[in-house]
Image: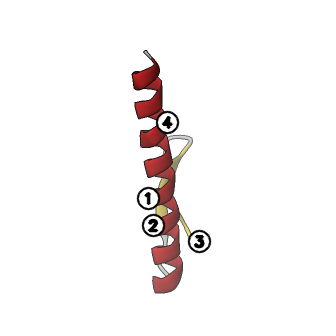
Amino acid sequence: MAEQIERQEKIAAGLKIAYERMLKFKRQKNSEVVIMHDGKIVRIKP
């Protein structure tokens, strides 16, 4: 059980790092981020 929790924490940490890198890349390229908000597709500038 502890191994599963540790694995989940590592996955969450990896996703956070990937998200931060994606935002950094989008800022460098002055590119929009596309997300879904309330069932609608929304484009935002980071």
Q: Element type at marker 2?
A: helix
Q: Relative to 30, does residue 1 appear above or below in the rendering?
A: above
* Circles 4 and 3 in contact, beta carbons < 8 Å: no
- Quadrant for the N terminus in the image: top left
Task: Report the mark closest to the observer, 1 or 4.
Answer: 4
Residue 18 is labelled as 1
Q: Relative to 28, does residue 39 appear above or below in the rendering?
A: above
Chain-order first, disc 3 or disc 1: 1
Q: Element type at marker 4?
A: helix
Q: Residue at x 45, y 67 (%)?
A: 22
- Quadrant for the C terminus in the image: bottom right
Chain-order first, disc 4 or disc 3: 4
Chain-order first, disc 2 or disc 3: 2
Between the residue at mark 1 and the residue at mark 2, the CA separation in whole angstroms equals 6 Å
Residue 46 is labelled as 3
Task: Tell me the amino acid under the disc marked 3.
Answer: Pro
Between the residue at mark 3 and the residue at mark 1, the CA separation in whole angstroms equals 15 Å
Q: Residue at x 42, y 41 (%)?
A: 11
Task: Tell me the amino acid under the disc marked 1.
Answer: Ala
Q: Relative to 6, does residue 17 appear above or below in the rendering?
A: below
Between the residue at mark 1 and the residue at mark 4, the CA separation in whole angstroms equals 14 Å
**Does residue 33 appear in this view?**
yes
Q: Element type at marker 3?
A: loop
Q: Residue at x 56, y 41 (%)?
A: 38
Task: Tell me the amino acid under the disc marked 2.
Answer: Met
Between the residue at mark 4 and the residue at mark 3, the CA separation in whole angstroms equals 26 Å
